[in-house]
Amino acid sequence: MNSDRLLIFCSLSLGGMLSLGGFPVVAQQGNTNVCPTPALSRLKPHRTIVGETPGSIANQYNLLPETLIRLNPILKNTPLPAGLEILIPPFNGIKIEAPNGATWKDLEDAYGVRADILFEINGCAKVPKVVFIPGTSWTSNSQAIQKYIGLAGYPLPTLATVGLKYGWQDSPINQKRLFHSGIDLLAPIGTEVLAADKGIIAFVGLEGPYGILVIINHGNTYQTRYAHLSKVTVKVGQVINPGEVIGLVGTTGQPDITEPHLHFEVRYKLPVGWVAQDPEIHLKVKPPAP
């Protein structure tokens, strides 16, 4: 999807723009968000009562006390007075001010959280400013691990060449840096698009740069997405099996390459939401390199 027209799972460039695909929250029955609400815009107020401690408050929200204390330094004072209003984040993490000129990749290197994850949970902002870093260990250099799923099938009838790979790329259209949240599998318009695994159709419809999009939920742990379709043959709530036709290849939306293709994504459910993974890791049969 071309970020010149719309910042969206989304993807920010490392000094440029972003592309395709980004709503970590699964789209359900037409209710979708092209880009997630920034974590720092989802802070909830909590007013303390007599006898509460940082630990007891953290337990109420399934958070670590350190998360609350870092966000609300006043919690270092004990005992806590009744009626004190503090802010509760949606998940564990810390709030930081990014250095001038820093990119999401710079923050990945500094905090060990993948740049694409940071980008998405902070609302797909082009430049990091005030940022929420998720997690419970903010000094490690470990990256989020991609869990191997092993999809049962392939999303097209035959192996297709990858026109644009997953990850940070130079846009073939405008040469700007973008994050590509899936792979673009080259295929003629009208080619049948197949379900890559058994699941339930969670979304069918027109969705911004994705164009005509189908999302399949495979249990409650991962999902696949099929974008730029010209036609769909399924409906929300339908149970689908591997290899069943869900639509046809098209050019709807805002593709990142000019050749007709299927934009295919795999997203895995992490505490921060539905996060894009490299689809090639999960395909048992690997597509040819571009």
Image: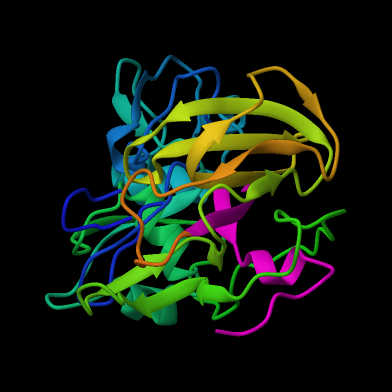
Residue 75, image x, y percentages: 37, 40
Q: Hey, which quadrant is residue 137 in on the image?
A: bottom right
Verify whether residue 269 appears in magenta: yes
Q: Is 207 left, or right, of 239 in this rendering?
A: left
Q: How many numbered badges does the structure rendering display?
A: 0
Residue at left 77%, top 58%? 154
Residue at left 38%, top 43%? 252
Q: Nearer the viewer, residue 131 or 281?
A: 281
Q: Hey, which quadrant is residue 258 in on the image?
A: bottom left
Q: Is residue 191 visible?
A: yes
Residue at left 65%, top 70%? 160
Q: Is 277 left, or right, of 230 in this rendering?
A: right
Q: Is residue 271 visible?
A: no
Residue at left 45%, top 20%? 31
Residue 28, image x, y percentages: 55, 22
Q: Is 167 left, or right, of 100 in this rendering?
A: right
Q: Is residue 59 above or below residue 159?
A: above
In which quadrant will I find the N terminus?
bottom left
Q: Nearer the viewer, residue 106 or 196?
A: 196
In which quadrant will I find the C terminus?
bottom right
The chosen color scheme is rainbow
| Start-end of magenta stretch | 261-290
Q: Nearer the viewer, residue 106 or 228?
A: 228
Verify whether residue 237 appears in magenta: no
Q: Is residue 235 above or below residue 231?
A: above
Residue 125, image x, y percentages: 23, 54
Residue 85, image x, y percentages: 29, 23
Q: Nearer the viewer, residue 100 or 192?
A: 192
Q: Is residue 187 above or below residue 251?
A: below
